Image (cartoon, rainbow, N blue to C red):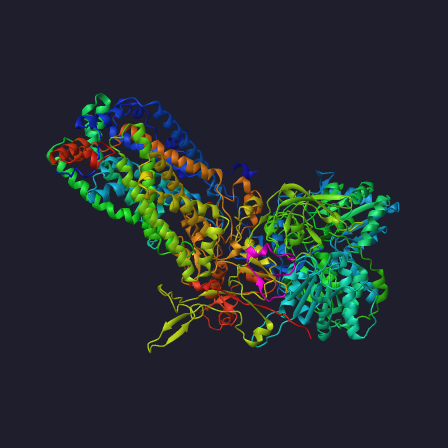
Amino acid sequence: MYESPLRRPLITGKTSYAKITDDIVTPIEAAPTKWWYLGFAISVAALGLWLLAVGYLLFTGVGVWGLNKTVDWGWDITNFVWWVGIGHAGTLISAVLLLFRQKWRTAVNRSAEAMTIFAVICAGTYPLLHAGRPWVIYWVFPLPNTYGSLWANFNSPLLWDVFAISTYFTVSLVFWYVGLIPDLATIRDRAKGLRKTIYNALSFGWNGSAKAWQRFETVSLILAGLATPLVLSVHTIVSMDFATSVIPGWHTTIFPPYFVAGAVFSGFAMVLTLLIIMRKVMRLEEYITIYHIDVMNKIILVTGSIVGSAYITEFFMAWYSAVPFERYAFMNRMFGPYWWAYWAMMTCNVITPQLFWSQKIRRNITAVFIISIFVNIGMWFERFVIIVTSLHRDYLPSSWAMYSPTWVEISMFIGSLGLFFTLFFLFAKFLPVIAIAEVKSIVKTSAEQEIAKTAEAEGIDLKEVHPQIA
Amino acid sequence: MDIAQKKYWRSVEELNASPQFIEESSKEFAEEIPVDELLSENSLNLNANRRDFLKVFGFSVTAATLAACTKTPVKRAVPFVQQPEEMSPSIPTWYATTYSDGYDYASIIVKTREGRPIKIEGNTFSGISQGGVNARVHASVLGLYDNARLQHPTKSGKITGWETLDSEVGAQLAEISAAGGAIRLLTGSIVSPTTKKIIGDFKAKYPTASHVVYDAISQSGMLEANKATFGSAVLPTYHFDKAEVIVGIGADFLGNWISPVEFTKDYIKNRKVSKANPTMSRHIQLETILTVTGSNADQRATYQASKEALVVTNLYNAIAALAGAAPVDTTAYDVAGNTIKSAAKELWAARGKALVVCGSNDAAVQTLVNAINQLLGSYGTTLDMSVPSYLRQGIDADMVNLVKEMNEGKVGALIMHGVNPAYDYHDSKAFLTGLEKTKLTVSVSQFTDETASKSKYVAAASHYLESWGDAEPAKGYYSMQQPAISPLFDTRSFEETLLAWTGNKTSVYDYLKANWKSNSNELDFGAFWRKALHNGVAENAAPGSQPAFSANVAAAAAAIKIESAEVELVTYEKMGIGNGAHAGNPWLQELPDPISRACWDNYLAVSMKYAKDNALSDGDIVKVEANGYSVEVPVLIQPGTFAGTVALAVGYGRTAAGKTGTNIGANAYPFRKGASVKVNISNTGLKTQLAQTQTHHTIEGRNIVKETTLDRYKENAADGNIRPYVNVKQEDGSTKKVYPGISRNAVTLWDRRDYEGHHWAMAVDLNACTGCGACVVSCQVENNVPVVGKEEVIRRREMHWMRIDRYYAFKTTGSDQKITKEEEYDNIQEGDNVEVAFQPVMCQQCDNAPCETVCPVLATTHSDEGLNQMTYNRCVGTRYCANNCPYKVRRFNWFSYVDNSKFANNPAQTDLGKMVLNPDVTVRARGVMEKCTFCVQRIQAVKLESKRNNRRPLDGEVQTACQQSCPSNAIVFGDLNDPDSAVSQLFLNERAYGVIEELNVLPSVNYLTKVRNKKSTVA
């Protein structure tokens, strides 16, 4: 397939199919590095803290958190929405970008999807554990029972949430695993002994035949088609948890698009945070190039600007509606007792991503890393601001109250990061972090050497069009 | 003997004694046991196959498992051998009785279920309490099941028997009496004629005995003044309902002053306005600290505590000037806005229908108050001396004398009942040293309290619900006290004990009945007695002519000495804890103060100015020192406090009040009488957190509590009540205003709800609610609402199903504008110019309930009678409903309050405390949501009863707990589907509105605008 030499190469350096396989599979075959052990140990320790906090929570009751009669959701749902948001980039990259034939996604989709799945797992722990009686939480499923009309409440956005999140998780998991099959077969083919048996089982007998590839492509496309609406639906429905309520600051029709943009925004930020470390540690600079980071930064810039406009729109609507409760809720966000959360959110989410208008910053790894962390923090605060500052001062001033987390909530948040990174470290050790087969599919078109070849044939000076790589 | 030869036979075979029978009868088993067969090779050869083995094995394992699973619960219920005639399981039995502890009085009815008293309501037959009950009386039922109760009589702290106690005490009394030693009977105010007769018998038996009445919070000043003025040391009965102008001077008559429930019932009769009768009394309150009474006043001004006498003398002079009487010699003084002078004019204009009450405990001041009322012609109209009240009888000097006598070693025996001077006497040290010098000390007490623990003998007293008695709170207003349960422990009532010591073997019941019979001229005493016990009251009050008035006002004014200090300390009583006798009651401890919304502690209430000047903020711990006594307490900034005054509540700082009440707050009693009014306050630099159920104090300019003034109301009954409407386009193109809150379901996106049977609703008159908090405790008792303790209240997790919101507004000087926003609150300098609004908030049972739509599992649903019902066992605890409730009335069970050891104060945690639980209401488990149900169990009971009688429930037949307990009848409950019901009528009232009804949630609770009888200028 012809690829214009004017396009940026997506794989830098001299590459070959064998080299790609070697680069990506070798870390799986080799013993883990001491850095891996260190990171994994810290993650597992944090996970241990999570187990401790959750054990105490289950044993004693939700009262171990700092919630009260006025603020009935705090860090629990903040973290839930934050994690779900983070889980948004993976499917967007693998499904939407697949449909749009964005080839750069091949380098990042595997780890982004893994991140999605782990983030959704982390998110899922919160609705389960925030319930007063988690042992009967299965009642939210419309299970047949002997009580006649006793059924779930289809009016409740929480119920929609259950369906949305579980569907999203299932489809993402299947999509991710289907994509893994050819790569697992590659590992299997190089492995011996027990390792071979395991990877053989995991690769579902992949034989690399043309028929297998054809079916693989079809399934990928179908799953991408299925997953695409989910990218929009999940956070739309999460936003309805708030938008359908009567609480000033929650009751807003702008929430669905604003939440989806925010989710993509935070998802890409988290992908960047992880990939910047991973490409360095696992020496994947040839696959995850500056160009990849640049493209993702542009997405952050767009979604960040959408989120910023949404904030301003909310304010305008609060003023324009002339509803005193609504006006108060927004003034309270800015100047009330939780002003610091609001301004942290504004700084991190509205101001910092605007720096990405500059290409220099977009391509400065250190700057990008710092900004991505800022966005992660900002998006956490966004959820905190929406949930806590709206609840703590609603209609009747007599019930106004303050909320602050206890050690249990803080431990559970740290612990959920531990859970996430534990899973991510295991993923990085035992599975290919880059989709080998997919990267190989673009070698013939988008590798640096191929682009150089085409340029030479067409008499184009590569130095002139791509000065930074030549 | 022939009988010995008689032989019985079992069968014909035995009779015949056939050989076969003889042989068989010698065998153990009638039939041959096939031993050989069993031991034969065939049967030993186990040829059961694998399947059979598994079947048998499977069955036995399953059977064993199932058998092991069913643990037979240990049930301790013992059925009646003979079912009492009036008692059927699950049907409550009501008894009328009387609560009287020398502090509170109420004629009550007691609900018993399966023999257990579980709820107290007011007795509407009573002319005194008129069906009203305050928070303390509501909570008193828990005192019956208090684990701290004394279960046996004790001697020197060790359990003893009644025989020992009676013989030893009897012997010593006889000995002391014979030796001429003084025997003193120390009690609180006793209103029971029969008890007084028994005391008389006791005094007759022991001639050296005398009776000393001691009230921790006495009306000694007024008693002495009345003795001087009218010749008898009694209190008058008050008729607030007949007063058109009321001036209160430091008398918290709606809170804790003498008989607050009676006063509230009367007061409110003249405070309810309607279009037909747009009048209400005018109430001016002059006081030092913000009280419930001051909060309800139309006009309020503050003065320094030590200037109280000056307020009275100046008021006297102002009225005397109008009446043409001679003024007394005094310093000219007036409170802010020349309120004394304007009040005098208003009082004079309404003479004959005016009333001045004063909380001072100074006889001279009360003499002047008597004189004011005499000038105003109040005696015989708003005040009645011909029907005196006996609710307070203690003269302070008597107690001082007794303590002196004790310290001089003159007292041989001291028998105490219903008093706790070791805690609440201002000089408790002197009392205790005196006690040590007293030979025989006996406490007749329910608890090993501060005093009982220092007495040699403690005669364990019964709870009032276990005892017989009677009461005469005011002349001719008799009420009966009958037990609702037999004594749970080895206890005796005070009367029983006294009878035993006088050597009278009669039971209290027989004595009581005989006493009544001897004083009765009823032809059929049996019928009268049954009726009196059934009704709980036997009233034959006959107002007569007023006793002659003679007062030396000049001498009284001359006797007044004013000593003031820059900062003065006043003590006051709280609505819940009162005098502190029931500090061990967790319901009362958790009842928030109506004004400060603080519970589980006392604190130094300081004015905003004082706090600003001394850089104090809420929770700062200060050391308060006066006359050599000091305490360390947290500060609470209380708007409405006079700038030079700080206030500390009594009733706290108990050192022996059971597990719940001990060491809560600091004891303020020693501050009550001292040589100097001077008080030193120093900041310790420490800080604590106060447990307040409300921390935001202003209404932020929101239209939540609507109010107007009487003058404006007369012009427009809907004044101040702007209701939301929508312009709806009509078919002819015109638009029409549609009020969703009035024509319910007029504007809706929802499916209309059809309420075919009933549509329950409630109306709350904000003009009537005084904020007293009786409803909060009543609701807690009725609905098994858990007690969560101080720490959880600090975390804003109290479980009360209904709360009373309190909002402050400040009048700025020189403008009609009121400050209602918290941000402006900090700029107020004085802060004593405060207006208070109370608003009881329970679940509003919205027709379009936001909570219902969001529950994922349908745990909260709408009933076809308009109730928003909560299915506890379906709740998974997402708390989404609580978030989405605009009124924030939902309460979550954060912990297992029934078995988590952190909540040991919760009555439901002990076997004894569990007895108080209402069996008709589920005790909620951990992790589920709960809220007000409109007392659905009461609705159901009435529906069943009316169905049995083949009729619809009558209007007013269903009474919610809050409604029934309300001393000001502020709450009306009923069926909106019945257009004639009181609640339907109130919903159509011009003053009715739903809180934040613009959300179109269609609350089933409507409030009636508060009307204040304000006067901008006084002619």
| Residue A366 spot, x, y in % from top left | 36, 34
In which quadrant of the rendered image does the N terminus of chain B lie? Answer: top right
Outermost right residue: B179
Q: Position of residue B639 (x, y in %)?
A: 63, 56
Q: Count the marks: how many?
A: 0
Quarter occupied by residue B372: bottom right
Residue B522 appears in the figure:
no
- Percent of width and height locating residue B5: 52, 36
Answer whether residue B820 is magenta in the image.
Answer: yes
Which image quarter is the C terminus of chain B in? bottom right
Taking the image as shown, residue A254 lies to the left or right of residue B683, namely left
Give the residues in magenta. B814-835
Q: Nearer the viewer, residue A7 or B359?
A: A7
Viewer-proximal residue among B309 and A202? B309
In the displayed structure image, the side of residue B291 where residue B64 appears, left or right: left
Q: Position of residue B911 (x, y in %)?
A: 56, 44
Q: Main secondary structure of the magenta part?
A: loop
Residue A369 painted magenta: no
> Residue at the spot x=76%, y=71% of the render?
B379
Q: Give the answer, above or below, for where A9 lies relative to B878.
A: above
Task: Say which of B762 and A164 sits in front.
Answer: A164
Which residue is rendered at x = 83% and y = 52% of the image? Answer: B210
Q: Residue furthest bottom?
A: B732
| Residue B503, above or below B769 | above
